[in-house]
Amino acid sequence: MIVDWPEEFDRWFTNVEKQGGRLLATTVALLQALTDLPAKPTEESATFKRVRQARRREFWRVAHPFDPDFAVRIICWFPTEQSVVIALVGFDKKAIGDVFYASAAVRGEALVDAWLRQKGDDSDE
């Protein structure tokens, strides 16, 4: 799987890289889990779950096992079944809990729209 992401995610990831430590190691592990996928997930797992708050597109969240210090989530959209994943939003949701998913879904849909415009594809799929 090829992982691509917009500038917003890149800024967040650059900040994570500066912080280093377990946060960086966990984030890199989540991105590796995306890279290792042979295709878009068809079933939920502990690592991959659908974001039910998303309305126009099917988003997935990538998560790690419980850690008392942080709760990194990466929200993704699979534009094709086999090749590309767009990592839309990275976030440490520990401080605000599941409320994060509603705002992430709205931001994620706007980011997908912008990514499609940048790539020259205005499709809704």
Image (cartoon, helix red, strand yellow):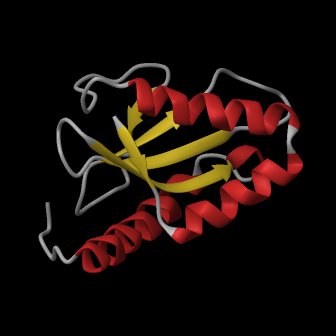
Front residue (pair 103, 80): 80
- Residue 82 is left or right of residue 101, and the answer is left
- Residue 109 is left or right of residue 74, and the answer is left
Q: Residue at x 31, y 78 (%)?
A: 118
- Residue 119 is left or right of residue 109, and the answer is left
Residue 60 sits above or below residue 112 on the image: above
- Residue 65 is left or right of residue 67, and the answer is left
Q: Residue at x 15, y 77 (%)?
A: 122
Q: Where is residue 36 shown, x and y percent of the image?
A: 41, 24
Kindly indicate the quadrant of the structure image that contains residue 40: top left
Q: Where is residue 95 shown, x and y percent of the image?
A: 78, 50
The total of numbered circles placed on residues is 0
Can see residue 63? no
Kindly indicate the quadrant of the structure image that contains residue 109: bottom left
Kindly indicate the quadrant of the structure image that contains residue 38: top left
Front residue (pair 9, 54): 9
Q: Residue at x 33, y 34 (%)?
A: 1
Residue 22 sits above or below residue 115 on the image: above
Q: Where is residue 75 shown, x and y percent of the image?
A: 47, 49
Front residue (pair 27, 62): 27
Q: Residue at x 42, y 60 (%)?
A: 105
Residue 86 sits above or below residue 9 on the image: above
Residue 16 sits above or below residue 120 on the image: above
Quadrant (top left/top right/bottom left/bottom right) for the C terminus: bottom left
Can see residue 53? yes
